[in-house]
Image (spheres, coloured by chain):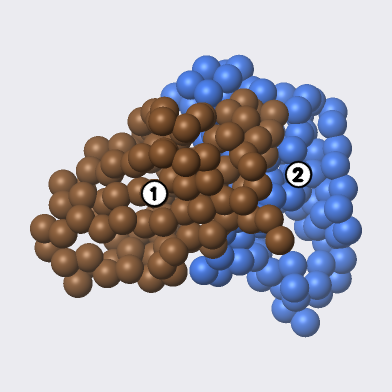
Chain colours: A blue, B brown
Amino acid sequence: EDQVTQSPEALRLQEGESSSLNCSYTVSGLRGLFWYRQDPGKGPEFLFTLYSAGEEKEKERLKATLTKKESFLHITAPKPEDSATYLCAVYMEYGNKLVFGAGTILRVKS
Amino acid sequence: DGGITQSPKYLFRKEGQNVTLSCEQNLNHDAMYWYRQDPGQGLRLIYYSQIVNDFQKGDIAEGYSVSREKKESFPLTVTSAQKNPTAFYLCASSLGHRGYQPQHFGDGTRLSIL
């Protein structure tokens, strides 16, 4: 069965304490991996697309990387405003759809 | 500003009632989607549409219906056949229905049972 698993489920960091979120997948026919940020009561906001192993994308304090089996979202020197749920989704050409992970809830305390 | 507008933000359904959630986009996107989000679970696809007057069932279409009469609009009806409708419903759109284009989301409608 095609699956996308995100870990940890929740993460608490102090402001400035760098860390990484993980997204592992067991889908066949991967055609793209997407990272989203979701604030409470809002829709997901698109962050990055990664298409092939070895690819990296950066935006401010966030950096996404991709291997053949997983992706990491690295957060460098986070600030309280980075607190949100981060969602990972994998696009499968078979079935032509996105499969979402359950998300990682990030809390950054000042 | 271009974007996706969902309304209402909150909706309450009585027993045996059908309710319709609105989704409008002005991004000139061809593809539109409806997802359901439950606590602790990933988003699950209800229906999607690649072009006007065409739509396909997703993974959890039972108890839902959609229409796509205009490119900008993709309303979702939650019918009385959906026995567990309480959830956060998200509408999305993308330039095309291929994996290379990211989906962009509205801010959701929270549906509850009265």
Q: Which mark is residue B75?
A: 1
Q: Is residue B93 left or right of residue A53?
A: left
Question: What residue appears at the point 61 percent right and 60 percent down from the top-left corner?
Answer: A38
Q: Can residue A103 be seen at all in this image of the molecule?
A: no
Q: Respond whether the residues carrying marks 2 and 1 are from the same subunit.
A: no
Q: Is residue B51 left or right of residue A25?
A: left
Report which quarter residue A32 is drawn in. Answer: top right
Chain at numbered mark 1 = B
Q: Position of residue A2 (x, y in %)?
A: 49, 27
Q: Which residue is mark 2?
A: A48
Q: Is residue B12 above or below residue B33?
A: below
Q: Position of residue A79 (x, y in %)?
A: 80, 72
Q: Is residue A57 left or right of residue B28?
A: right
Mark 2 Cα-neighbour bin, 10 Å: few <14, some 14–19, many ≥20: many
Report which quarter residue B15 is drawn in. Answer: bottom left
Chain at numbered mark 2 = A
Q: Position of residue A61 (x, y in %)?
A: 86, 59
Mark 1 Cα-neighbour bin, 10 Å: few <14, some 14–19, many ≥20: many
Amino acid type, callout 1: Pro
Q: Is residue A106 above or below residue B101?
A: below
Q: Can residue A56 be seen at all in this image of the molecule?
A: yes
